[in-house]
């Protein structure tokens, strides 16, 4: 994990996508709180989180942030918020900070972390 690269990435989001920064920062905090062995790196224009295998990532776009799950197709989706129809990946689109609570993000992140068997 390169702390400098992560901090540079966060500063860039803070400066150039100020409206999305609170979403990115809160998602990051939720993921890192899921377990002590979680690492993060800047990859694919976002933050990729691993605990051995990568299990999710946070990616800011122009008007929203996506929380991507590496093995999202294996996750239960009791709330119906997972999108995507690829072989493995699924994502949840977040447009406002409140989406983190209303879309049960902590629950999905915990499930993805558990599925990664870290």
Image: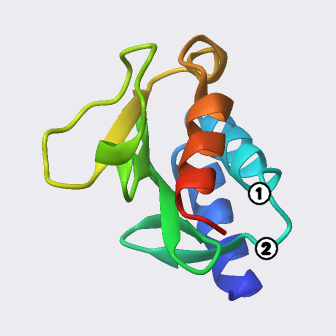
**Dot placed on the residue nearer the N-terminal end, 2 or 1:** 1
Position in image of residue 3 (x %, y %): 75, 82
118, 40: nearer the viewer: 118
In the image, is 10 to the left or to the right of 84?
Answer: right
Position in image of residue 72 (x %, y %): 36, 46
Determine the residue positioned at 49% across, 58% down. Answer: 57
Position in image of residue 58 (x %, y %): 51, 52
46, 34: nearer the viewer: 34
10 Å crowding of disc 2: few (<14), some (14-19), many (20+): few
17, 79: nearer the viewer: 79
Q: Quadrant of the C terminus?
A: bottom right
User: Please, which colouring scheme is shown?
Assistant: rainbow
Q: Is residue 62 visible?
A: no
The reply to whether callout 2 and callout 1 are in contact (CB within 8 Å) is no
User: Please, what secondary structure does the residue beneath circle 1 have?
Assistant: helix
Report the disc number at residue 37: 2
- In the image, residue 44 sits, relative to residue 29, either above or below, namely below
**What residue sits right under mark 1 in the picture?**
32
- In the image, residue 16 sits, relative to residue 62, either above or below, namely below
Position in image of residue 20 (x %, y %): 55, 37
Question: How many circles with numbers are drawn on the protein?
Answer: 2
Determine the residue positioned at 68% across, 87% down. Answer: 1
User: Please, what secondary structure does the residue beneath circle 2 have?
Assistant: loop
């Amino acid at each position: 994990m390169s702390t400098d690269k992560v901090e540079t990435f966060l500063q860039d989001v803070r400066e150039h996508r100020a409206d999305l920064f609170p979403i990115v920062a809160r998602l990051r905090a939720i993921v890192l709180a899921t377990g002590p062995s979680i690492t993060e790196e800047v990859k694919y224009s976002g933050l990729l989180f691993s605990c051995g295998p990568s299990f999710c990532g946070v990616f800011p776009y122009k008007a929203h942030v996506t929380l991507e799950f590496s093995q999202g197709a294996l996750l239960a989706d009791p709330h119906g918020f997972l999108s995507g129809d690829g072989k493995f990946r699924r994502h949840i689109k977040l447009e406002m900070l409140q989406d983190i609570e209303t879309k049960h993000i902590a629950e999905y992140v915990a499930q993805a972390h558990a599925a990664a068997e870290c």
